[in-house]
Amino acid sequence: MPDSEKYDSSLSRTLFMQEGDPDFDPNDTIAIVIEFQGALSDIEALGFQTDDSMEEQAFGEVSYANLPAVAAHPNVLWVTAGERPVTELNTAARDILARASDATNVGTTAGTHDGLWFANETGAAGCLTSAPMGQFRVI
C-alpha cells in the first residue's frame, strides 16, 4: 500500500502492521478521521463512509483498498487512524446530579416522573433525567 504524506504516524504504523498480516483483507474497513476542505460528498464518492462531521473534520470508515484514493483527493488535507464511535455513559450518576430512584416510583403514566426516570407522552417509562423532580429534561 503506498505511503502518503497526508497520513499521520499512527495511520502509517497501522498500515505497516496490516501489510505483514497474513489474514489482511484489503476490503476490510478502517476507522479514520480526515481534515478536509470543500464538499465532503466528493470524498464520500471515493468510498469514505461518514459517521459524523464537524466543520472541516470528518469521522468515518473506508476500506483499506480505497484509502489511498481518499487520501489522494485534493480536498483531503490530513488523515489519521480513528476509533469507531461507541455510545457510552461515562459519567457517574452523582456527577450528573441524578437523584436516586426507587423502582416502584418510576413513572408509568404519561408525564409522571420521580426525579430520575419519567414516562413519555405514550406512557413508556425509561428516560433518564438529571433535573429535580418537577423540572426535567431528557438527556
Image: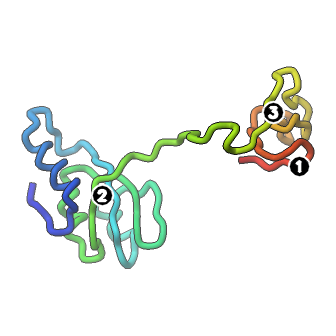
Quadrant in which the N terminus appears: bottom left
**Residue in the picture at 15% in, 68% down:** 5
- Residue under numbered circle 2: 47
Q: Nearer the viewer, mark 3 or mark 2?
A: 3
User: In this rendering, would 21 be left or right of 72?
Assistant: left
Q: Position of residue 7 (x, y in %)?
A: 20, 63
User: In this rendering, would 124 be left or right of 75?
Assistant: right
User: In this rendering, would 60 be left or right of 6?
Assistant: right
Residue at the far front in the pictured view = 94
Labels 2 & 1 near each other (Cβ < 8 A): no
Above or below: residue 83 compared with residue 127: below
Gap between marks 2 and 1 measured at Cα: 46 Å
Q: Position of residue 87 (x, y in %)?
A: 53, 42
Task: Specify which label sits upstream in the sequence, 1 or 3.
Answer: 3
- Residue under numbered circle 3: 124
Residue at disc 3, secondary structure: loop
What amino acid does circle 2 point to?
Gly
Residue at disc 2, secondary structure: loop
> Badge 1: how crowded within 10 Å, few (<14), some, or many (20+)?
few
User: In this rendering, would 23 be left or right of 103?
Assistant: left
